Amino acid sequence: QLLQEGARRIDTELRGQPAVQAQLLDTIGTVYTGLGLYDEARSMLQRALDQRRGLVPLDGKQLARNQVHLAHVLTEKMELDAAQRLFAEAIAALEARGGDTPSRIELADALSGLAELHFRAGRFSEAEPVLARVLEIRRNSLPPPRRQGDATQGTPRDQEPASRAQRARRGREQVDAH
């Protein structure tokens, strides 16, 4: 009921602010998605997408984000053809943007959704290369691994993030040194 009231207020109180309306409708739609209320989510996300498409200038990154959110819901509802079209449009837009790590992560998320769609459709051979691409993007988005002595020089040991294995190794080294 709170979400329904919020959606109603978006229409009345934010009438002259279509970008804000689109963002809030998308947010409400993603909340509905998280609650498993896919019919309500679809309605809000479709409204957000329609609103976003009418904006000038068009924000391609936000449009792609809206498309992916709606495509996830359509996948849950097994409306796979419509979902696949939205994923394809979003992926094309995100690939055209290229660039920074956040954009690459959004691309990986869209590709992951497409792979899930293929999986649900029983198209496992189509899902596999898409998932391989997701993995490649995510690996390339990680910071480089730290080597011993890098970036921790001058940092007190108690401030270093250390795994259980690293702490045990240090303990053994201390014992061996005595």
Image: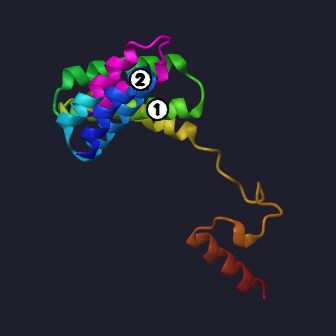
Do residues under tags 2 and 1 come within 8 Å of each other at their CB atoms? Answer: yes
Helix, strand or loop for disc 2: helix
**What numbered label is drawn on residue 167?**
none
- Spatial distance from mark 2 to mark 1, Cα to Cα? 9 Å
Q: Nearer the viewer, residue 136 or 40?
A: 40
Residue 168: give x, y in percent of width and height.
61, 77
Residue beneath the point at 63% across and 74% down: 167
Q: In which quarter of the image is the C terminus?
A: bottom right
Magenta segment boundaries in residue numbering: 45-73
**Residue 56 visible to an observer of this rendering:** yes
Residue beneath the point at 32% across and 26% down: 11
Q: Mark 2 points at which residue?
A: 64
Residue 174: give x, y in percent of width and height.
73, 82
Residue type, numbered disc 1: Glu
The stretch drawn in magenta includes residue 53: yes
If you read the primary sequence from the N terminus, does the residue marked by circle 2 or circle 1 appear first? 2
Residue beneath the point at 68% across and 53% down: 146
Residue 153: give x, y in percent of width and height.
81, 60
Residue type, numbered disc 2: Ala
Q: Nearer the viewer, residue 80 or 1?
A: 1
Count of marks overlaid on the render: 2
Q: Name the residue under label 1.
A: 106
**Residue 130 visible to an observer of this rendering:** no
Helix, strand or loop for disc 1: helix
Mark 2: few/some/many CA within 10 Å (<14, 14-19, 20+) = many
How did the renderer colour the structure?
Answer: rainbow
Mark 1: few/some/many CA within 10 Å (<14, 14-19, 20+) = some
Q: Predominant secondary structure in magenta? A: helix
Residue at the extreme bottom of the image, as rendered: 178
